[in-house]
Amino acid sequence: MKKQLKWYHGLLALALFAGVMWLEYHNFFTHINPIYTSTIGEVLFLLIAVAVVLIAHVKPRTVFPFKRLRLLSIVGSYLMWRGTLVIGMFLAELMIYLFPKLAVENDGVTQMMRSMPMWMALLIIALTPALCEEMFFRGTVMHSSYKLRIPALIILVNAVIFGAAHLSLVKIPTVTILGILLAYMTYKSDNMTYSMIIHFVNNASSVFATFFVFSLPGVPEQTQQAASAAAEIPSGMLGVMLCACSLSPLFIYIGNNLFRRGLRKDKGGPQVRFKKEWLLLLGSVGFLIFAIGMLIFARGLEGLIDFGTL
């Protein structure tokens, strides 16, 4: 039987993680260019993850499994991410609607991205976290919780820790949902490569969107106005985002099916099949979500016009 991490190894890793976050919060790295501060933190997380594994005398490949990829599983991973992405965006919008002061929380990250070329933003904001955070959270931290035995509990606990670690109220729901997907893929496949790819795609999409928006004429000058207007986000915007969530149930179901089909080629066993009743049920749920979203949109249409969206 392979030697595994104990629960206290995970606590040790999280305690060291908290120490690094404390140093960052108290500007311990003030003498370093702010652009590189986050990268240093990410590298320290990676070193902590590996160090704890070595201290515990557990084989690194047991905690950090890397195996060959299946195209079908990659496609399924992407579809599941697309389904969860819009749900996360809706929850972030809802948090800002309920707590307007949270609208300026992400401004620091946006400003940092604008101060560097795109290739550097992809390296610092997309690639580095995808490697380092996955090694830490889906590697050392999740592996140390395997004694919980219940897969759903292991995945949920890991996702909650991942969300809370980002120390942002507006991000917690979004990052937690992403964490559920990343933890699920790693646990189900016993392969960290899938979660690393999706983590990178998630962060890279944010980088591309930011650079695209700020490349539009007049947008940089309107940034401050948009930030103040965000505090008065109309309810109709929530309706638009909810309508965008209407296909999420089907995306997640179809994506999960394809993901598991790809894994079956490695593990053998019966083929994973689509169930018509589930497709019908989730399609109906999606239609209901769309209808509710349209109702909210219609009720908030005047606010959207005043807001300047329409």
Image (cartoon, rainbow, N blue to C red):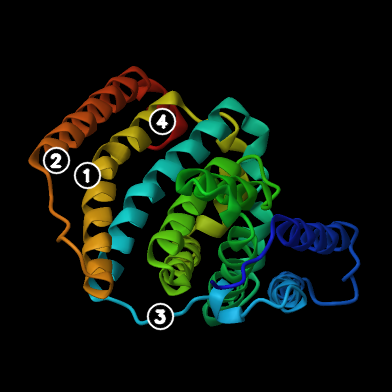
The residue that label 3 is drawn on is: 67
Percent of width and height locating residue 202: 45, 62
Query: Can residue 175 be seen at all in this image of the molecule?
Result: no
Circle 3/circle 1 CB separation < 8 Å: no
Quadrant of the image occupied by residue 15: bottom right
Percent of width and height locating residue 4: 62, 67
Eye-nearest disc, 3 or 2: 3
The tag earlier along the polypeptide, 2 or 1, is 1
Label 3 vs label 4: CA separation?
A: 41 Å
Percent of width and height locating residue 178: 48, 52
In percent of the image, x 80 and y 76: which residue is there?
33
The residue that label 4 is drawn on is: 238
- Report whether 126 appears left or right of 167: left
Q: Nearer the viewer, residue 261 or 285?
A: 261
Q: Nearer the viewer, residue 84 or 142?
A: 142
The residue that label 2 is drawn on is: 279
Three-letter residue code for mark 1: Leu
